[in-house]
């Protein structure tokens, strides 16, 4: 094992980080005091390459973006090729090959009615575009009172103020309670039973009653389909999604589906909404869209929604980012779609799911691990376990103990509070996945023995 960076360089990097970098979702006073940093010098496939030459299996896909592994050679080649031609140009009144063909190819893997592609930067801005589209479309079709939204308890849709307004994870939303827009949060169909008992009807009754009573002021319903990621990989029945689709159609409420995490095969189908056999009005796409290479997102809308913006410049969608339709990102997104067409990425999820499901069942049933593990679930390439702790939710500490154990064994498994989970690259080699799951089991057992 040879170091990728020498000691002097590592010390320089750490000093610069401690002095200047404000890390996301990090208590900075503790971080700067302990500064127990993982210094990543490179990445390849399912591995993070550390400065000292060690490797960590990336069990979380670097916040779920690395769907095809790190530095996929085809994506790097596409980036290099596009960079030699055109790095950026405004998409305002300009057409360029990468964005035009990317939009066509993304529409080709959507249901036929979803064929209008609006580009942005990341999942948060894809959501922001979607809610603005919904409100403006209703306003311009004679329904100006439709300005409010509905989302689930435990929802997470991003970091902008608009996306935060939709969020149902209270610890993320609370600091901004005075500035978020009006969103009604309804009970999650996953409820307290994160393994998703079939009793989702009570949650549906709550949203049905709300929409029937207040539909004249409701612009849209925004849902993470089947899996609520940031709230702890909570899983719910596709039947709920179907029933909400019917409600939205009946009462003219825009149905927005957030596929930022679940899309691109995460659940064993290209789009999670396929499991419910529905077609949303708007779909938000990011993360796997560019395979974790560049920030890029898309909001895909139905053609009928676009028609609400006809009638001159004052009625157009006056919204857009400087890097909207960025040629580099669009070229990579096209190559991602090519890989999905040519390689069994989605089909390969089933075999990986079987390994993940078996490993989490062993955690639940193990003589030692069952002391710590309260509940488990697995769907597609996701596996998650709730750990028993005096506290629960995102700020719980027990998951971090598993994280530290896994780190010493060669895996990066950042928890969601008391929830430990895996969501690796969809094409992770099977032997690497077995190693990752073995590390997870050993780490949970080590913590279980200690508590």
Image (cartoon, rainbow, N blue to C red):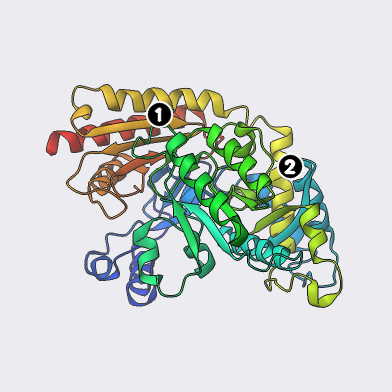
Q: Secondary structure at mark 2?
A: loop
Quadrant of res 265: top right
- The nearer-to-camera label among 2 and 1 is 1
- Residue nearer the viewer, 449 or 230: 230
Give neighbour class at mark 2: few <14, some 14-19, many 20+ (Cα, 10 Å): some
Residue ID at (42%, 30%): 199
Label 1's element? Answer: loop
Can you see residue 398?
Answer: yes
Residue 425 image offset from top left, x and y in percent? 52, 40
**Quadrant in which the N terminus is drawn:** top left
Is 294 left, or right, of 13 in this rendering?
A: right
Q: Is residue 418 left or right of residue 234?
A: left
**Residue indicated by mark 2:** 110
When asked about the image quadrant of residue 299, the answer is: bottom right
Percent of width and height locating residue 291: 61, 48
125 above or below 345?
Answer: below
């Amino acid at each position: 094992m040879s170091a990728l960076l020498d000691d002097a360089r590592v010390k320089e990097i750490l000093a610069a980080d401690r002095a200047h970098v404000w890390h996301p979702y990090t208590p900075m006073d503790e971080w700067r005091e302990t500064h127990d940093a993982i210094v990543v010098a490179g990445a390849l496939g399912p591995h993070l390459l550390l400065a000292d030459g060690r490797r960590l299996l990336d069990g979380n896909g670097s916040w779920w973006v690395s769907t095809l592994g790190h530095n996929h050679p085809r994506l790097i080649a596409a980036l290099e090729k596009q960079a030699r031609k055109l790095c950026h140009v405004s998409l305002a009144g300009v057409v360029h090959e990468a964005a035009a063909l990317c939009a066509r190819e993304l529409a080709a893997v959507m249901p036929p009615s979803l064929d209008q592609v609006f580009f942005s930067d990341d999942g948060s801005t894809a959501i922001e575009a979607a809610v603005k589209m919904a409100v403006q479309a209703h306003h311009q079709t004679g329904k100006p009172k439709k300005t409010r939204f509905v989302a689930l308890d435990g929802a997470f849709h991003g970091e902008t103020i608009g996306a935060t307004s939709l969020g149902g994870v209270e610890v993320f939303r609370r600091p901004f309670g005075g500035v978020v827009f009006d969103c009604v949060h309804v009970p999650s169909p996953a409820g307290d039973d994160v393994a998703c008992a079939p009793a989702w009807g009570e949650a549906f009754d709550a949203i049905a009653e709300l929409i029937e009573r207040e539909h004249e002021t409701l612009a849209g319903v925004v849902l993470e389909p089947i899996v609520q990621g940031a709230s702890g990989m909570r899983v719910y029945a596709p039947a709920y999604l179907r029933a909400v689709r019917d409600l939205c159609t009946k009462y003219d409420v825009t149905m927005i589906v957030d596929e930022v995490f679940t899309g691109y095969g995460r659940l064993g189908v290209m789009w999670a909404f396929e499991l419910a056999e529905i077609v949303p009005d708007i779909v938000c796409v990011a993360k796997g869209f560019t395979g974790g290479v560049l920030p890029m997102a898309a909001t895909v809308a139905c053609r009928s929604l676009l028609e609400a913006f006809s009638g001159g410049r004052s009625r157009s969608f006056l919204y857009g980012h400087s890097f909207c339709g960025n040629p580099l990102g669009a070229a990579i997104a096209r190559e991602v779609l090519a890989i999905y067409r040519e390689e069994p990425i989605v089909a390969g999820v089933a075999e990986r799911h079987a390994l993940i499901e078996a490993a989490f069942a062993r955690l639940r049933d193990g003589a030692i691990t069952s002391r710590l593990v309260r509940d488990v679930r697995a769907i597609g390439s996701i596996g998650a376990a709730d750990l028993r702790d005096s506290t629960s939710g995102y700020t719980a500490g027990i998951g971090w103990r598993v994280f530290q154990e896994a780190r010493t064994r060669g895996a990066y498994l950042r928890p969601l509070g008391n929830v430990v989970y895996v969501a690796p690259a969809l094409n992770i080699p099977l032997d690497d996945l077995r190693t990752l799951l073995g590390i997870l089991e050993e780490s949970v057992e080590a913590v279980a023995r200690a508590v």
